[in-house]
Each structure stands twice: as C-alpha cells, then as structure tokens.
Image: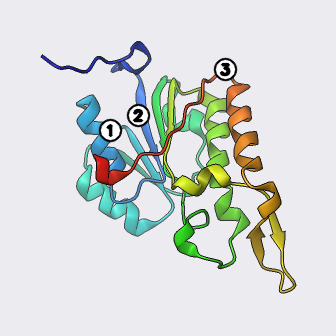
C-alpha cells in the first residue's frame, strides 16, 4: 500500500499529451515517464546533439529539433489536450555559478515560452525547473562596456511579473526549492 496519495489535479488522463520543452539528454522525461508509467509524447530542443541523445533514451517520443519559440503548440498537439507541459529553460544566466560574468537577455527570457503554451493550448499542469536564483530574476542594466548584468535594486521583479502573468490565466502558481541531494 502506497503512503502517497495523488492529488486530483495530478491524476493523469492518458488522452492528454505530455510535452518536454528544452529536452536535453532526457533526465526530466525519464522522471516523468517513471511517474506516469508512459512515454513523453513530444520532446523539443534546438540542439541536434541533445535531440539525438534524447532519441536514444526515449525512442517512443516524437522529437522536434527546433527552437521552442518556433514551435506552434497548436500544431504540435493537433487539438489533443495537454496534461503536462514541462519546461527546463537554460539556467546558466541565473546561476550563482556564473559569478559576475555578463548575462544574455535572450537566454534569461526563455521562461516566457510558458505563456505561449498557456495562450495556445492551456496545459492542465505546468512544471518549470531552474536554479534557486531564478526567483531573483529581474531587469538587467548595462555597464560601460555594454555588457548586461542583473540590477541589484530590482532583484526578483521580473520573476514576480512572470508569476502574475501565469496567475492571470487562472493558474495557481506554487514554487519551492528542491535539492537533488535530498532525493
């Protein structure tokens, strides 16, 4: 007997699709598949090497080798409902491991793709994983060399706007810090 009970919003309907955005080698898809007992339907990544590795690890998944921005969620789903949309946008430009190096606005903005999926196909459950510093996502400022750095005075503002944008579509947003060493 399992001591865990699945909340109704996470009970999965097998008619619903599972989409893995920013799919790399397939770690997220492996976890999703283990939890749901079925393959991920579609994996999306712009990098041919990442897609090739994901294909080896997840041969039953449909793979799209293109930018998440170029993918039309309506076309990808073909009218089927989306039960889970998973997003693992690049965390490099949020992580403290980057140190004081300049950041790229284009990469820091990848999480906004969630709103495109919400607007087009309204996934029932959305998961976005990133580093703990993601909650400090804020506007950038330029230095004398034209390099961009997070504005320390407006730390977390973009994250707050992002959360509110999702909530305006009727979603309840929950976030927490999980450390892999605890699991």
Using the image, determine if residue 144 lies above or below residue 166: below
Q: Which residue is mark 3?
A: 170
Q: Which residue is under mark 2?
A: 18
Residue at the spot x=74%, y=25% of the render? Answer: 168
Q: Residues within 10 Å of mark 3 (few under 14, many from 20)?
A: few
Residues 127 and 178: in front is 178
First in residue order: circle 2 vs circle 1: 2
Q: Relative to 18, is 11 above or below? A: above
Seen in the image, is 84 located left or right of residue 53? right
Residue at horizontal 40%, vertical 13%?
8
Q: CA distance from mark 2 to mark 1?
A: 9 Å
- The image quarter containing residue 14 is top left
Give the distance between the C-alpha atoms of the residues marked 1 and 3, in whole angstroms: 24 Å
Decide if residue 69 is in sight here: no
Residue 130 vs 174, above or below: the answer is: below
- Direction from residue 158 to residue 170 in the image, left or right: left
Looking at the rendered structure, the secondary structure element under dot 2 is strand
Report which residue position mark 1 lands on: 32
Q: Residue furthest left?
A: 1
Q: Where is residue 134 drawn, in percent x and y?
A: 60, 53
Which is more foreground, mark 2 or mark 1? 1
Q: Of callouts 1 and 3, which one flags the residue occurring earlier in the amino acid sequence?
A: 1
Under circle 1, the secondary element is helix
- Whether residue 10 is visible here, answered yes or no, is yes
Image spot of residue 95 (x, y percent)? 55, 65
Q: Is residue 146 left or right of residue 107?
A: right
Marks 2 and 1 in Cβ contact (< 8 Å): yes
Q: Name the secondary structure under disc 3.
A: loop
């Amino acid at each position: 007997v399992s001591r865990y009970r699945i909340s109704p919003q996470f009970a999965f309907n097998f008619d619903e699709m599972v989409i893995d955005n920013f799919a790399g080698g397939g770690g997220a898809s492996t976890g999703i598949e283990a939890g749901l007992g079925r393959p991920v339907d579609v994996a999306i990544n712009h990098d041919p090497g990442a897609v090739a590795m994901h294909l080896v690890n997840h041969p039953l998944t449909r793979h799209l080798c293109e930018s998440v921005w170029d993918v039309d969620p309506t076309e990808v789903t073909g009218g089927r409902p989306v039960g889970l949309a998973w997003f693992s946008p690049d965390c490099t430009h949020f992580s403290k491991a980057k140190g004081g190096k300049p950041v790229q606005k284009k990469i820091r903005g990848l999480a906004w793709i969630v709103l495109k999926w919400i607007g087009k196909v309204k996934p029932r459950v959305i998961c976005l994983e990133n580093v703990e510093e993601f909650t400090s996502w804020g506007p950038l400022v330029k230095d004398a060399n034209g390099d961009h750095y997070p504005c320390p005075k407006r730390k977390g503002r973009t994250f707050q706007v992002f959360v509110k944008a999702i909530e305006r579509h009727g979603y309840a947003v929950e976030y927490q810090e999980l450390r892999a060493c605890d699991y």
